[in-house]
Image: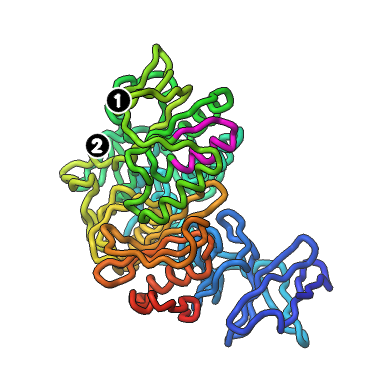
Amino acid sequence: MRTSDMAAGEIRIRLEDIPLGGMAEGKAGDEAALFVRDGDGVRAFQAKCPHYGAPLAKGVLCGKRVYCPWHKAAFSIADGALLEPPALESLKRYPVRIEGEEAVARLEPIAADTPRHPSKIDHLVVIGTGAAAVAAVTTLRREGFSGRITMIGREGHPPYDRPMLSKNFLAKPTPPEKPLLEPDFYAAHGIEAVQGRATRIDPAERSVTLEDGRRLSGDALLIATGSRAVVPDFSGAGLDGVLTLRSLDDAVDLSERAETARRIVVVGGGFIGLEAAAFLTKRGCTVTVLAREEFPLAKRFGEAVAGGLKRFHAGNGVTFRQGEVARIVGEGAVRAVALKEGGEIEADLVLIGAGAAPETGLIAGVAPREDGGLAVGSDLALAPNVWIAGDIAAFPEHGSGTRARIEHWRLAQQHGMHVARAILGEAKPFKETPFFWSNQGEKRLDYGGYAPGFDRIILRGDADALDFIAFYVKDERAVAACSIGRNAEFTAFLHLLEEERVPSPAELDRGADLTGLL
């Protein structure tokens, strides 16, 4: 592909290098732009995803949207509008002109129209500063909401990117401000920030009482209190060096201690535990994962995928032990983990990865379900002008037809965006497709859909080589997929699932081409 910079601030690309119904990146020096060409002509946008900076030209074009190749943020190819998180802002769009056989983009962003949606809500109080809360308030401001927004958070930090904490943040000493979304987040979005721990939320009165006695109320509430780390009642769980990984402060503490720790035991083989184990091993620590299962994550992904992941981590230095904790041993500070099966694993640090519990106990007049979540309808409303979002919401999951409580960062963001649009008067059911990613060392695992108690798995590729896509079938429908190294095929599945156009299991068994259905 030939691109040139005939004039400063411009990028040229040959039309023949932009496939009809496709996209390509044009460059001029250090500058780049994404060109998209369809029956409506050629449009140009910023070349990198505003989330983590992935090159969008390596993403997948599905109908009228382009998906980021890394974390599946989606944007409209009509105007660059944000359609799906984890990005929180739309793409910059550049003016384009056609000169002969070339398209020329001028790198001066077209001013986006700020829509003005009438809203009967003057003051929104948001309890929480995590994914759902941030997505809600950024969507509101992006869509022109001019009312008051108050955010209540118990941490002293501005909102931050929680998924980063168990990944590269741990691989080396990292400044604690690195995960912050914006150091001046509250001021940038016109938000009144309140630091404090909520002790009672009253949906009927739309009020929040804080630990210090302050009481705040608004004419609407978004309850997005999230989850807290679970620490089983082990003897010795209070010893110095027994840690959890849920907050930025937790991550900073773990990272600092990893500078001198030689032996780390991770209790639990879930996503957070395996991610942390992989990146702490890169740090030079000797890491042992203690899990009850022979193949951690087999219940979620099946034994073939879980076995491939386990062997991959073991090949990179992580030790696996099957067993259960009897107690944590030490005098003042942790020395070892004693096993119910007998024996000990020596440890300077113990990271508890035993899951998370939704923070629902402080919401008055509402009984949590057995899974800890609060049941809401497809509008995510708990009461008039009171919404629930994120980890605490037990909502009707459209794809599987079941009620679900799902602890995914991107899903919480989708909840937040949905609530924001409800506040702005858009009344429609929540139907977005769950998706999450997990950085297992150098491998990125993608999972889309929801498949509790799946009946069978259709596997394409080689799970041991971590080059595969697995489809999870429930009641003769493929309702979820998991993949490593098959980005185009996986993204196509995610898009088709959203549009309810996934091929039948029989067609998938016969090798149906998902990208050909876009």
- Dot 1: what SS? strand
For residue 326, the mark is: 1
Q: Identify the residue at horizontal 51%, vertical 49% (top origin).
A: 439
Q: Which residue is label 2 attached to?
A: 200
Nearest the viewer among 327 and 110 is: 327
- Dot 2: what SS? strand
Q: Residue furthest right?
A: 6
**Residue 468 image offset from top left, x and y in percent:** 48, 63
Q: Residue furthest front?
A: 342
Looking at the image, is 514 positioned above or below residue 228? below
Q: Identify the residue at horizontal 39%, vertical 41% (top origin).
A: 269
Q: Identify the residue at horizontal 54%, vertical 52% (top origin).
A: 443
First to last magenta residue range: 274-288
* 26 lies left or right of 390: right
Residue 177, picture quadrant? top right
* 173 lies left or right of 141: right
* Magenta part, dominant SS: helix
Question: Sequence order check: which comes first, mark 2 or mark 1?
Answer: 2
Q: Identify the residue at horizontal 43%, vertical 68% (top origin).
A: 494
Please tell me how many numbered marks the rendered image carries. 2
For badge 2, the amino acid type reads Arg
Kindly tell me whether residue 187 is visible in this rendering: no
For residue 55, the mark is: none
Kindly tell me whether residue 287 is visible in this rendering: yes
Q: Residue 283: say if magenta.
A: yes
